[in-house]
Image: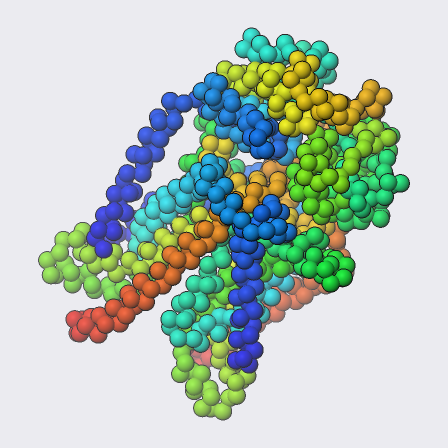
Amino acid sequence: MKKVLSALLLAVLIIPVLLAAAPKAAAETVTINVYNWGQYISDGTDGAIDVNKAFTEATGIHVNYMTYDSNETLYTKLKTGGSTYDVIIPSDYMIGRLISEGLLEKLDYSNIPNYQYIEEAYKNTAYDPTNEYSVPYTWGTVGVIYNKKYVDEADIGSWDLLWNEKYKGKILMFSNPRDAFAIAESRLGYSLNTQNEEEIRACAELLLEQKPLVQAYVMDQIYNAMEHEEAWVAPYYAGDYLQMLEVNEDLGFYFPEEGFNFFIDAACIPTSCTNKEAAEAYINFLCDPEIMAENLDYLGYSVPSEAAKEYMDEEAIANPVAYPDAETLARGEAFLSLDQQTNQLMDKLWLTVKTSGGANYLLYGGIAVVVIAVVLIVILVSRKKRLARRRSGYTR
Amino acid sequence: MRKAAKIVTVIIFVFLYVPMMVLAVASFNKGADISVFKGFTFAQYKALFEDNVLLPLLLNSVIVAVVSALLSTALGTAAAMGIHRMGKRARRLAMGVTNIPLTNPEIVTGVSLALLFAFVGTMLKIKNVLGFVTLLIAHITFNLPYVILSVMPKLRQMDPNLTEAAMDLGCTLVKAFFKVVIHEIMPGIISGALRAFTMSLDDFVISYFVYGPTFVTLPVEIYNYTKKPLHPKIYALFTLLFIVILLVMVLMNVLQARDARQRREIAPLRKKVRQ
Amino acid sequence: MKNKFLAGPYLVWMALFTIIPLVIVLYFALTDSVTGRFTLSNLAAMKDYLPIFLRSIWLAAISSIICLILGYPVAWCIAQTGPKVQRFLYMLVMLPMCISFLLRTLAWVAILEDTGMINSLLGRIGISPLPLIRTNGAVILGMVYNYLPYMIMPLYTVIIKIDPRLVEAAQDLGCDHAQVFGKVTLPLSVPGIVSGITMVFVPAVSTFYISQKLGSSGTTLIGDVIESQFKTAYNPNLGAAMSLVLMILIFICIGLMNRFTGDDDEVMTL
């Protein structure tokens, strides 16, 4: 027993020492925290390049890689604080929002020489007009993924498919407000960047109307559900469709006729960054044409650099899903950063949409009555008991 | 009635183990999809041993579990002794505090700690406050009540005269403390420590709110993973873990049985000594 | 060591990491997310989420009752066996809790899904898929499955402590099995029932994982909403207000439950 105890005490004493020593050991190697979308980098599966490993081999800098599933999750993480991230890859509108709230560092482009390979079309954008905060990673579009086995070809073509009663319970929907509202907005013919309260409320109504048909509000779970046919219809990013297609050949994709979102995702450095130079080295590495080519060959997203295209799989570049023709692209609209009021309204309405329904007030009213009755009985009984006990105490 | 209860019991045991069987079968599945069995293979186990993501995360979980179990056991045992000696009102207050993390939903504990750490982080201007230390603090906090609750009953059972007897027989206060008190409540300490260890090893909800990018535990990563298709090697990992835990539990059972037998043999002797 | 100050470090720890965090939750619940000024609007917004609170309480209550109905015979059966078997069976009840509850829930998803095990079996014999997953029933199943051991443990602890002589005495006095159960065993196991219900109800009412995986878009629970406010829709103030209300609700429930045991404890000591 003594031995056990002394071992225990020893352990308690040693551990703080070890803890104090641990950071010192870690300090020898530089590690950066990279926070990116899920399934959004070539990670070495199926013989493709492992970008993070290649970066460590090239520079000696270690990568601590983490993923999020929506711009809003990323935003929440940054706002909540407490964690450092060195490189993040948000989408256009979120970059605008982060810049306006002072959450991004200005980049030192002299450390990112590969920025020259990025095409002019993806520079001087609305979200970062002066090219100070971001380096494009990919661009892409949002469309509808459907399973050809179950979905009638006659039903496809527009966003209406997501409101089609025939596929009730087999429809997935974005779980982040911006992408979800965008679908309703383009279905109603509004701008994807509308800040008109009435229009946004009308969209919320439309989404509420869709809710009974929706199987789940999800992001990356769409992969699993679509691949093994748990769901048949889902709006998602074109690049991800190409990844799903490799698992399930029955999946189809189309650009809705009403219009759709066109986006650019770009690498940025948040203010919580602790090692800016290493972070810039990472961003530079991502822009290296050969690396970018291999990475995007795997991802299926569209490449923002002609130089990288030269190294890419020819079939991939010719794919009309990743690189739609000019006529289709003309229907696309980019997101802009919305003002705070609109963001708040959208968040609030979206929460209402997600939490509504299934409320059977008669049932709940009944429960409430029962609960109150039980409470009253408990109180009465316990009081009676106490009185009885007190009385019996006196008589005894 | 007895028969009906027995049938229910059997059904419940099957019910409790159905998902475990599903996981075990999935670990031998050729396909990645858990619900479709495509053929038998050991490939997932091979992938598991070559893996360099899951195992470090499991190690992280074990580190947090061990350290938090040790620290909360030390702190909690001392606390239990202190509370045991308290007056009625003070004890009531202390036990009230102990009850807060026990009755609070985990999500509220997690959220409240997350807010505290974020607050401290901004106060002290530390950018990366979330990490191993915050995770450890959170785990110790939810472990402490369990340790106290397993030590307190043993203290109550203990004969208060034992320490005095030991001191009469020439022990110093400190020696008497270790020889008698700690010895007497050891089963409580051990079961408290084990409980703390298992609680913290599998904790997801609280960790989810206080983990930082530098230190991620396995359950948190599984949650992040499940948004994407899960790699079947995870099933292999948990099938192995299940077997290990089963063996440990059986072993503990045997040891406990032996211990109980010894105690039964010693008990009459003790009574004699006391007389 | 007669020193009550041994509890000092513990009390300081609890003050720092339990009391102060709760004060911060209160602070967040009472301030505005943008301006940081005092406001009651977060708490006032709770009326919009009343259906969700009710739904969470309803599902958790049903799960607790099912756990009690299923758990009682199990605990009773375990208590009837010999000491060695008893220890082994008790271990079997504990064992599932050592395996990641996320994965076990996921296994249920694989069983219940439209393309899952049960439905593909049914499909093979020509029955079209049943709506098993994404129903209230699936959520309740998930809760019962995950928290049943928390019910069995306290029940078992209480039942083995029941003095067999009391049962014999009741039988001698002419009680049949049902009467013995109703007049002796059941009343004496009330403390176990109360603590079992508490241990099932609290995690069930605040869960978010089970409802995310097994529930539908119409079974959002209060835990889901709190989680989303802290993880995806940055609004910790609203989340804090919900946490506060949830916490108060649970403390009220437990306070009421303890009234049952409070009385019976005294009965037992008589």
Q: Position of residue A327 (x, y in %)?
A: 85, 21
Q: Horizontally, is A27 left or right of A137 in the view?
A: left
**Is residue C192 toward the left or the right of residue C43 in the image?**
left
**Could you tell me which quadrant the C terminus of chain A lies in?**
bottom left
Residue B187 image position (x, y, % from top left)? 31, 60
Image: B256 above or below A263: below
Say which of A374 and B198 sits in front.
B198
Residue at 47%, 18% in the rendered image: A59
Residue B92 visible in the snapshot: no
Quadrant in the picture for residue A232: top right
| Quadrant position of residue B267 | bottom left
Front in this rendered view, residue C224 or A167: A167
Q: Residue at x 33, y 56 (%)?
A: B190
Image point (35%, 60%), residue name: B251
Please name whichever residue, B6 or C13, is drawn nearer the observer in this view of the structure.
B6
Q: Position of residue A301 (x, y in %)?
A: 69, 26
In the picture shown, does residue C116 fall above or below B46?
Answer: below
Residue A194 percent coordinates (x, y): 80, 27
Q: Is residue A16 left or right of residue A238?
A: left
